[in-house]
Every structure is written in structure tokens, then in C-alpha cells.
Image: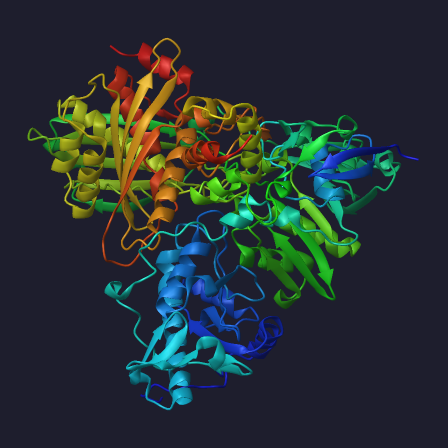
Amino acid sequence: MAEIIHFELNGKNVEIPLEKGQTLLWALRTNFNLTGTKYGCGEGYCGACTVIMDGEAVRSCGISMEDVAEKKITTIEGMSVAGKLHPVQQAFVDHDALQCGFCTPGMIMNAYGFLLKTPRPTRAQIIEGMEDNLCRCGAHTRIIEAIESASKVMKV
Amino acid sequence: MKKNTSYRDEVPENNPTFEVNRRDFVKLLGGGLFIYFQFGNFLSGLASEASQRRSLPSDYNAFIHIAEDGTVNCMVGKIEMGQGIITSFAQMVADELDAPLESVRMVMGDTELCPYDQGTWGSMSTRYLGPSLLGAVAEARAVLLSLGAENLGVKPEELAVENGVIFIKDKKNKKVSFGQLTKGKKIEKYLEVKPKVKDFSEYKIRGKSFNHADGIAKVKGEALYSGDFRMPGMLYAKILRPPSHGATLVSADTSEAEKLEGITITRDKELVAVLHRDPEKAQAALTKVKAEYKFDEMKVDDQTVFKHMLEFPSESRVVRSSGNIEEGKKNSDLITESEFQNSYVAHAAMETHTALAYLEGEKVVVRASTQTPFGTQDEIARELGLGLEKVRVIPPFLGGGFGGKTAFRQAVEAARLAKITGKPIMVQWTRKETFFYDNFRPAAVIKITSGTDKAGKISLWDYHEYFAGDRGSDTVYDVPHAKTTSYSARDVHPFLTGAWRAPGNNTNTFARESQIEMMAAKIGADPLDFRLKNLKDERMIAVLKSVAELFGWTPAKSPSGRGYGIACGFDAGSYVAHMAEVKVDKATGKVQVIRVACAQEMGYCINPEGSLIQLEGGITMGLGYALTEEVKFTGGDVHTTNFGNYQIPQFSWLPKIQTKILERNEPPQGGGEPGIISMGGVIANAVYDACGARLFQLPMTPERVLAAIGKIK
């Protein structure tokens, strides 16, 4: 019998049999059908798979499920509450800070994790905080603006 | 042939397959009004031929369906990959129809529901499909007016339309909505005499900015890409890959992999796939497969490729010619001879190539990230030996394309495996596979011999383009003796190459605009003045003057030490001019782009903000091919495997971006690509202006910048 691990996923207690070699990214995408978290590179370079683990933005492609036991995970699907977009999501919409949208969930989760730690960031801090999330369409300028405006609204 | 406007409820006679298609529509969409509309004259014979082989009406290229609830479904063969046509097409439809924007639903690229389309590339959607789309919508509106006239007991001329409601002009309360008119009916209409489309002055929704229609779905993570679909019993397929291009599989021992729990191995000719419901288990099992290959690789690498290409037997073709090159040489006071190079560049869209294939009865259905759903359908049908009607390709949202998803190998792989196994198969390439099988932007060489006369006019332009592609190879400037020769050959590259955002034009504009500034520098002219003096094209002059104002250009001869550069060109029917300011770290060779200004004229702009977003995207993406992006390889062995060894633009690279769109009431032109074409040239010229180092090769890596600084006399 596989060992069962428990963790909190988007505010709910969940459990999953521990499979050797399974990463959080693919557990989310296959076992929990939470496909907002994207596979972009599988090696931690791009940030498309970013989620929040115990208040920190992490790359789910590099997190083994055994390290998720008893943790609190928030994915993009857990960001809006009762149909209302989270301020970071709303800012991305308002600033049209996306094109193809594939990097967008990872961008939003990384921005959220960043703002939890740096609630009133300077532009330079935003750039540093977002540096390793990749976007190929070139939505960067608007993403920075969106995070600047979200930081004024988001309550930490 | 009736002269008067009339309706035909029956389908055109030359479409025996129409019935099948109509049934599918009705099944999918229920009742309502269907309007089919005609191909424009722009399509090549090839495309019309392709469309005739399909179970689609051959003489229509989009459909409008007005549902009973007033929803306007618009079906086009194009796909959405971030360029924003899901928004701008809806604006066009709503505006032409006088329907609320939110009532328009775009159905895109589904080979079963949408009419044939060659593919989404070349910034062609708005400028080529647009006119026939509008023609169809105008027709839909005329049909609705006629139905409204019957319903309200007046003549169509007495009616007006607003927000999807038809009313009598002087009795606004006598009204009927589009939905009411179509309720409970299945009506197909076809007008023989086409109504006129609206004039620019009548536009209400076009010309206004709207945010991405798909924005909310995308920020919630709800927008579905190919890899996000789930089917009962779905298996992930991980496919055995050769170590290099030119390697052929000799044998594969799958016995170790087969021992793993839940693993199935499927083998069909060269295709060896490891299947498991868990993609990581499949990937792990794949590493247990022992394979042997024989190698027949080209003897070329990223260093020797330029020599290789110039020595390769190629066919030359004169693209355009005016005057006489020898005459031009005689008339020239100063001659400049240069050779420019650029390396292979990857598309590197954030979504890797992905496809889900499954059987639906005898039919294979494939949800694939493809820019060419109909080409994908063709190839799958051919590979599987099926009729086109047995293959349905549905492209969901694409996580970027840039030309890279005109190749669809992954979709064929998924379809083959689904047919063999009978199970739903997901093929989601790793980043390494996506780099390996990318149809790279080709490495290329440009040779230019040009001259100026004593009056500072360009007297000679002899342009030779090797393997870049001739798009953007226009002389642009007004030169009496000019010739462009293009060289091409099959099998010159060790791997696949293809269209990369504004194919050919990035390379050509880099070479041309670098050469122009070299000539200006030689005669001590301000590079903006030099351009304006040698241009006749009013539209190019207008964008140059506009960007100069935006940027705050002041005349100086280069190198001025300011780090200012200019580049301009045209692409996809649009005109662009860029100016940039850079800082060059002379100790490290690192280039930081401080700001980029860009003016674009693209005819009538449907969604101004959407177009600015495309410009910003082009400028930002263009920093990569200008500064870092370069595929490394030895023979067919591609060393570039992930973002760790292929650097694409990041947040800290961002210049301040200033953009402007010039208004012009002429048919809309392309907007997805022009913004990127100048980025190599404008940065190269700014680097020269900063420090006097002329870069002849893209990307302008720190090593190359240092080497160029070392060559300053």
C-alpha cells in the first residue's frame, strides 16, 4: 500500500497516495485536474508552474510530493473568492498584462508571493522579484504596471 | 442570374458535401440564422484546391450563425495565440452587424465547424480574412433587416439597427431583436447581390480599444490549452527521440521499461512510445529504453555554418532590379561593402508542442496547439490513411506560436498512437523536445555593396540575401541602381527551419538598416537626415518623423556617444520606424537597452490598445534575437535544450517603451509582426553610436561586442 499524504489545497484538506518521483506540478495537473498550473520547462527556469507553498512562491515542477505533506498549497484556481478576482488577477485584467496567457497563472502566483513579502514594492523590486518568470509574448511592461497597481489594493 | 437582391434558401448547387456540414452545425448550434460567405480573391489556387477536398463548402471562408438567444457565433479558420484576433474580429463583427460586442462568440480553427484556412501567420488575419468576414456580416445584417421588415410589416429602408435590435426609424418602440427573428427557425440565407460594407465614418466599435476578450479566463487559469483537456482512460505518451538530427533508429530494447508497472510500449515503424496515465512515470520508463542509432549527420556547427552556407550549391533569383549596378558603381563616390550574419533562433513559445488525440467512432479527434489546423488535418489524414472527414482538428488557445506552431509533428504522433491503441493519447513535448524539433529561424548571410554620390544620395544598392528569405529584402530607399538577389537551397540546414515572427524581415532589416547608418557615418550625415533625404515613400517618411518626435531625436553624426540608433522598414503591409537608446559596458561588452520608441502605420487600426500591445511584444521579444538568442549545435546535435542555455528576454532587460500608431483611413494591415523587424538594426546602430563598434552578427553577445570594440581604429 502506498503511503497517503495529506495537505491543504486551495483551502481544502486533501490526500493523495505518495508516488515515487511525482512532482507537485503533475499531481496538481493529473490527480487534482488543476490545469491552471502550467508545464513550461520542467527544470525551474520559466516559472509557468509557480504556486504558493506555505506563503512562498515555489516552482511546482521541482517540488516532490513527499515534501508537500502537511503543507498549504495555493494555485491559481484558489485565487478568486466567491467569483471575485483577487486584486492581482484583477490588475492583470485591467492592465491587459497578458497575450497568449500561458505564463499568466505563474506570473500571478509569483507576483502574489512577492507582494506577500514586499507589500509596497518599488519598480526595481518588482523587476527583481519577477526576473525569473519568463514571458515570450513580451507582456513584461504591463505585468510590472499591473503588480504596481495591485500592490496598492492588496491587503496582506 | 437575378439582378435584384434575393434570397436563396437552398444551398449552392456546387456543394454536394454541404449537407453533412450543415447537419453538424445544426446539431451543435441548434436553430437560428446561418449565413455563409464567400472567399475573397486573395487565396491562391492551392488554397482553393485544398478547400475543395474538404467536406466544407468550397466557396465560403467564414460563417455567421445567429442563435435564438441573440448570440452571434462567428466561425473562422484562424486560431488565437495571444495576438488578439479573438477580440478584434469580434469588434469587427459586432460593429458591422450593429450587435452588442458581448453577444459575439468567436469559434476558431475547428476543422469541422470552420471553413478552410491556410493558417494563422504572416499577420494576415485582419488584412486578408477581414474583408470577406465583413462582407459576410454585412450580408447577415441585410438578411436580418429583410426578416425584420417582414416581421414589422414595413420596407427594409424604413428600419434601423442598434445593439442587436431592429426598429422602425421614426417609431423606436416598433422593434424586434435578432434573437426573436431567428427563434424557432432554422433559416439559411444566401444573398446573390452583396450589400455594401460600412465606411470608416460609420464605425462605432472599431477604432476603440478593448481589453483581451479572453483575459478573465486566462487570469483565472481557466483558459484551456491543448494539455489541459482530460479524457477517461487518457494516457501520456513519451516518445523515444534520436540523439541528433540525421540519426536513424537501428534497434530499441524496451524490455526493462516494460517491466515497470502500468507501462505500455507502442511501436509503429520508427515511432517508439512509452505510455502511462502518469506522465512522469512514462518519462522515467522512457529512460530505460536502450536504443542504437546509425548516424549520417552534416559536418557543420554553429561556428562554421556561415561558411557552409556560402559554399553550399544554391539557386539564385533576382527578386527585383532597377537601373544598372555597374552604372551605379561608376556614379558612386564612396562604396561600402559589408557582410551580415545571424544565427539560428528558436521560437521558444511558453507552451511546448502539445496534442491530445482520441477516437470518436471512426473519427480521430485531435486537440492540438497548431497554427495550421487544416494543414494538421491534411497530414494526419495522409499519415493514417483516412479521409479528411474522419479527422477533426480542434485548436484550443495556443500558448504562443510565433511561427513555431506551423509545424505539428506532435499532433501526428498523438493521432497515430490514438489510432493504434484506441485510447485517448496526450503528447506534451518536453522543453528539450520542443527545442530539438523546432523549425528554427534560419541562420543567414547578407552581403551588401552600396554607394553614395557626392550629393549624399544613395547611388548604388546591390543586395544579396543567402537563406534568410526575401521578405523584407526591399531596398526601401529611393536608389536609381538597385538589385536584390536571393539565394536558396534545399537541405542546407542540419535541422528544420521555418517561419519565425516576420520571417526574413528581422535579418534583412538588420542588414539594410546597419548598412544605411554605415553609409551615413561615412559621409558624416545625421542618420535620420540621411534616411529622409533618400526616401520617397511618404508613409515611411511619416513614421520616421513621428518616431523622431516621440523619441526626441536631435541631429548628430554617428558615433555621437549618445547611444542612439534608428531602424525602419515595412512588413505585412504596415510601416514601422524604431529609435533606441543603449548603454554599452565597454569592460564587459554588455548592452543595456535604455529605451525604444516605435511608430507604426497600419492602415485603419481596429483595436488601438491591442495593436500597441503587439508593438510592445515585438520590441520586447526582439531584444532576444538582437542580444542573446542563438541555437548551439554540432551537426544534427542540438545543444540548446532549455532556457538555461537559451536566454530569452527577462524583466531586467526591459527598456522604457514608447509607442504610437499613426491613424490612416485605409484597409487595416498586419500588426502582429512589424514591431519586431527593426530590433536587430536599431540596437546595432545604437551600439555603434554609443562606442563606435559596428556589429555585423546577431545576436550581439558581450563577446561579439568586445571583439567589435577591439576592432575600432
In front of the other: B8 or B527: B8
Where does residue B170 sit, x and y in percent of width and height? 28, 82
Residue B398 visible, this orientation: no
Relative horizontal placement of residue B302, taking residue B664 as reference (left or right): right
Residue drawn at 62 percent across, 49 percent down: B226
Residue drawn at 59 percent across, 75 percent down: B30
In front of the other: B202 or B502: B202
Where does residue B322 sit, x and y in percent of width and height? 19, 45
In front of the other: B293 or B236: B236
Given the current orientation, which residue lies at the most extreme right position? A1
Position of the C terminus of chain B, as image quadrant, is top left
Residue B143 visible, this orientation: yes
Given the current orientation, which residue lies at the most extreme left position? B455
On the image, which quarter does residue A18 sit in? Answer: top right
Where does residue A90 sit, x and y in percent of width and height? 49, 43
In front of the other: A28 or B373: A28
Given the current orientation, which residue lies at the most extreme bottom position? B153
Where does residue B352 sit, x and y in percent of width and height? 59, 40
Residue drawn at 37 percent across, 60 percent down: B128
Residue drawn at 30 percent across, 74 percent down: B196
On the image, which quarter does residue A95 sit in? Answer: top left
Relative horizontal placement of residue B549, taking residue B339 as reference (left or right): left
On the image, which quarter does residue B177 sit in? Answer: bottom left
Work out whether B478 lies above or below A155.
Answer: below
